[in-house]
Amino acid sequence: MKTCYQCGGHISRKIIDLELEEGVIIKKVPAEVCDKCGEKYFDTKTATFIQEITGFIKNKRIELALPARGKIK
Ligand SMILES: [Zn+2]
């Protein structure tokens, strides 16, 4: 049985909706959540995925191009 690194509470496997930032929610994330303090633990694959998305949000970078047109005279 796993215990929480923060408080030593019992950890149970859950599927959660994870809110990274206001309005940015990843749904159905498999996680191990502490019953006592709510600390969340993720497996490596999930953690990497979350990190990638967090990085993308931090950069807030998006590039858009207008559709190609004929030459402007
Ligand atoms: Zn805990």
Image: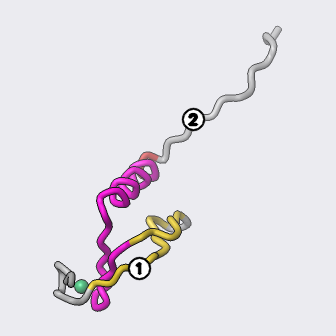
Residue at the disc numbered 1: 14
Asked if disc 2 is less than 8 Å from ligand 1, the answer is no
Residue 3 x, y percent position in the rendering: 19, 83
Residue drawn at (29%, 58%) of the image: 44
As helix, strand or loop, the secondary structure at mark 1 comes to: strand
Q: Quadrant of residue 29?
A: bottom left
Residue 23 x, y percent position in the rendering: 55, 66
Q: Quick check: 29 above or below 5?
A: above
Asked if disc 1 is less than 8 Å from ligand 1, the answer is no
Q: Quadrant of the C terminus?
A: top right
Residue 62 x, y percent position in the rendering: 55, 40
**Would residue 33 be counted in the magenta stretch?**
yes
Q: Which of marks 1 and 2 is nearer the N terminus?
A: 1
Coloring scheme used: secondary structure
Ligand 1 position by quadrant: bottom left
Q: Inspect the image, locate mark 2, and give the three-letter code of the amino acid beneath it.
A: Glu
Q: Quick check: 34 above or below 58?
A: below
54 left or right, relative to 67? left
Q: In which quarter of the image is residue 18?
A: bottom left
Q: Inspect the image, locate mark 1, and give the three-letter code of the amino acid beneath it.
A: Lys
53 left or right, relative to 23? left
**Would residue 58 be counted in the magenta stretch?**
no
Which of discs 1 and 2 lies nearer the camera? The answer is 1
Tag 1 near tag 2, CB within 8 Å: no
Residue at the disc numbered 2: 63
Q: Give the range drawn in magenta.
A: 31-57
Residue drawn at (46%, 65%) of the image: 21
Query: In the orientation shown, which residue stands out farthest toward the front?
Result: 1
